[in-house]
Image (cartoon, helix red, strand yellow):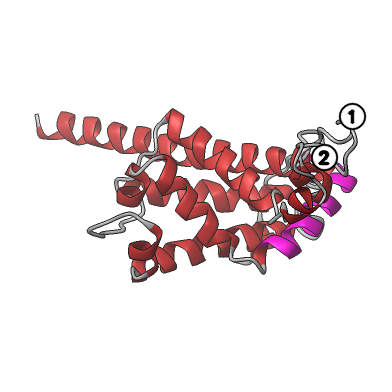
Amino acid sequence: MGLCSSKKRMTTEMSDEEVAAIRDVWVRAKTDNVGKKILQTLIEKRPKFAEYFGIQSESLDIRALNQSKEFHLQAHRIQNFLDTAVGSLGFCPISSVYDMAHRIGQIHFYRGVNFGADNWLVFKKVTVDQVTTGATDSSKEKDETNSNGTANGKVDTDTNLIPIADANNVYSGENCLARLGWNKLMTVIVREMKRGFLEEAMRNCKEEDNNGLLSA
């Protein structure tokens, strides 16, 4: 069965403009090893993620992680999944993305990987942040600021107070179309992953109960 084979009928939760913006920012992100950045940031924020992803390392600093084959493998899997999801938008029903995420949730159950509510939120936020926030250059701020701390000798205005990162990165604003689109995409992905995990857990509980009744 291919990615577009889903027969479920669900309406898309993203506009055509948001889908286009999602694709646009992803082109930059995937060439910048975003999968690695996502996983590294997850582990920095919550070291428990290293255990979830099966990464065994004496240290969790970036140098040690870069020497871990499992770290690179899991980072590749994260990026590959997102690449497949983004690539399907606009060409396949959105339910195809739901199905992929749902299946991953089922796999998590059988591997004993339960993120928990808080960690799901961290996963979503880190992914949105890393995909939509590009590298910025703050050198201009230093060059254009004199010893008195004012830009070119002028008193700071509201415009000058805007961080350089925000001025240079068109994806950094909370209301940016790409960020809004990615937030929607990750919301449904996380929702379906959780649903896949919980449904599989409930199904197994029922099977255990039925087996218990038969053996009684």
Residue 120 shown in magenta: no
Q: Is residue 91 above or below residue 146?
A: below
Q: Nearer the viewer, residue 67 or 25?
A: 67
Q: Give the image location of residue 32, x and y in percent.
A: 64, 66
Q: Give the image location of residue 19, x and y in percent.
A: 82, 50
Q: Which residue is depicted at the point 33% across and 43% down?
A: 48
Q: In which quadrant of the rendered image does the N terminus lie?
A: bottom right
Residue 27 falls in image quadrant? bottom right
The answer to whether marks 1 and 2 mark residues whose Cβ atoms lie closer than 8 Å is no
Residue 27 shown in magenta: yes
In the picture as drawn, the residue positioned furthest to the front comes out as 147
The residue at which mark 2 appears reads as 176
The residue at which mark 1 appears reads as 157
Q: Give the image location of residue 119, x and y in percent.
A: 44, 35
Q: Is residue 170 above or below residue 67?
A: above
Q: Nearer the viewer, residue 198 or 214?
A: 198
| Amino acid at dot 2 | Cys
Q: Is residue 13 visible?
A: no
Q: CA distance from mark 1 to mark 2?
A: 23 Å
